[in-house]
């Protein structure tokens, strides 16, 4: 597949939309002629939720059409977005389904359109969203800033979501399967020690720990990390009280803290260190309490 480095999401959308405006009309197409989406970000489907949606479709019909593409000369359609609606419609026994049909798209357009439509859906779990972000970046050279602009999130939020892919596979599967929440995952990723992180994950599942519990666990881990001995340096104006306060703040915040005296006896500054964006989020939440 060709890479469109630095092209940006908006240019991908423009290219797709300019491709075939007449293909944007809603049509009824046979359910049996729709193939799965090769670029589907969602990895897990809740069977109970599908059954509930199926009953709703039986009673009220499909409220929002799915999106598909159809290449020239091809007999089958390929799904762009709406796999849950398609699966539920099949469960409801529908022979046809309302669909917006795009025509004759190349592979770049298919991938870009599919990922964009899906990551804008708010019901994707955080790991599947992160995988979609990464695929956009790898296949198109799209920047995190461009993704953030398109999906209406901050660049830091996109970066933090991508960092979830650094978690161990079983923890990522726990997010995808709903065993833990995105909040749990963000607290877990702030624990740099892999064994401690896995211990915390197993406790979430076994003991149903809250996000606050795991944040406290992470805070305690950071507080127990060895720090440099608190001995005043030659020429230092730090009092024993200031050194004791530094130590106390480090235990509270779970990170390195420095009290820096100012030019006068009653001024100075407090420097709070962080070692990742998630660490910054964790410290910020503690300060805001």
Image (cartoon, helix red, strand yellow):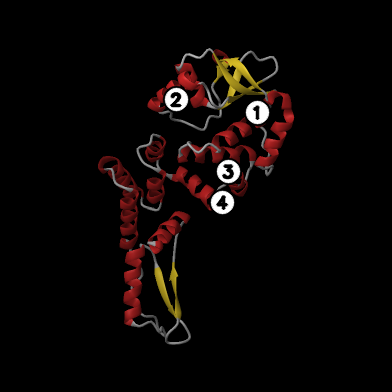
Q: Secondary structure at mark 1?
A: helix
Residue 189 horizontal/vertical position (percent): 41, 49
First along the sequence among labels 1 and 4: 1
Q: Tell me, for residue 151, which label it has, or none.
A: 3
Q: Quadrant of the C terminus?
A: bottom left
Residue 257 horizontal/vertical position (percent): 40, 69
Nearer to us: label 1 or label 4: 4
Residue position marked by numbered label 4 in the rendering: 155
Residue position marked by numbered label 1 in the rendering: 107
Q: Assess disc 4: are there few (<14), some (14-19) or many (≥20) residues with their C-alpha within 10 Å of its C-alpha.
A: some
Q: Are marks 3 and 4 in contact (CB under 8 Å)?
A: no
First along the sequence among labels 2 and 1: 2
Q: Residue at x 66, y 15 (%)?
A: 74
Residue position marked by numbered label 2 in the rendering: 53
Q: Assess disc 3: are there few (<14), some (14-19) or many (≥20) residues with their C-alpha within 10 Å of its C-alpha.
A: some
Residue 9 horizontal/vertical position (percent): 65, 41
| CA distance separating discs 1 and 4 | 27 Å
Q: Are marks 1 and 3 in contact (CB under 8 Å)?
A: no
Q: Secondary structure at mark 3?
A: helix
First along the sequence among labels 2 and 4: 2
Residue 67 horizontal/vertical position (percent): 60, 26
Q: Assess disc 1: are there few (<14), some (14-19) or many (≥20) residues with their C-alpha within 10 Å of its C-alpha.
A: few
Residue 273, relative to residue 22: is it above or below? Answer: below
Q: Secondary structure at mark 2?
A: helix
Q: Are marks 2 and 4 in contact (CB under 8 Å)?
A: no
| CA distance separating discs 3 and 2 | 26 Å
């Amino acid at each position: 597949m060709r890479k469109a480095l630095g092209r940006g999401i908006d240019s991908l959308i423009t290219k797709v939309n300019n491709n075939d405006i007449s293909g944007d009309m809603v049509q009824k197409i046979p359910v049996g002629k729709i193939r799965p989406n090769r670029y589907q970000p969602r990895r897990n489907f809740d069977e109970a939720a599908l059954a509930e949606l199926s009953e709703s479709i039986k009673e009220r019909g499909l409220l929002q059409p799915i999106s598909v593409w159809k290449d020239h000369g091809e007999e089958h359609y390929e799904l762009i977005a709406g796999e849950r609606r398609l699966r539920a419609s099949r469960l409801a026994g529908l022979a046809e389904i309302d669909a917006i049909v795009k025509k004759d798209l190349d592979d770049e357009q298919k991938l870009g359109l599919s990922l964009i439509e899906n990551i804008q859906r708010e019901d994707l779990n955080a790991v599947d969203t992160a995988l979609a972000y990464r695929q956009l970046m790898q296949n198109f050279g799209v920047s995190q800033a461009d993704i953030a602009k398109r999906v209406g999130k901050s660049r830091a939020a996109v970066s933090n979501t991508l960092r979830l892919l650094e978690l161990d596979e079983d923890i990522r599967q726990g997010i995808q399967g709903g065993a833990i929440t995105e909040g749990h995952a963000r607290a877990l990723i702030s624990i740099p020690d892999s064994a401690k992180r896995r211990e915390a994950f197993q406790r979430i599942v076994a003991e149903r720990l809250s996000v606050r519990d795991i944040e406290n666990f992470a805070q305690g881990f950071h507080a127990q990390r060895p720090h440099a001995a608190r001995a005043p340096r030659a020429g230092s104006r730090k009092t024993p009280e200031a050194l004791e306060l530094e130590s106390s703040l480090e235990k509270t915040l779970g990170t390195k803290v420095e009290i820096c005296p100012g030019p006068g006896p009653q001024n100075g500054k407090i420097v709070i260190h962080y070692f990742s964006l998630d660490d910054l989020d964790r410290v910020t939440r503690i300060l805001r309490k």
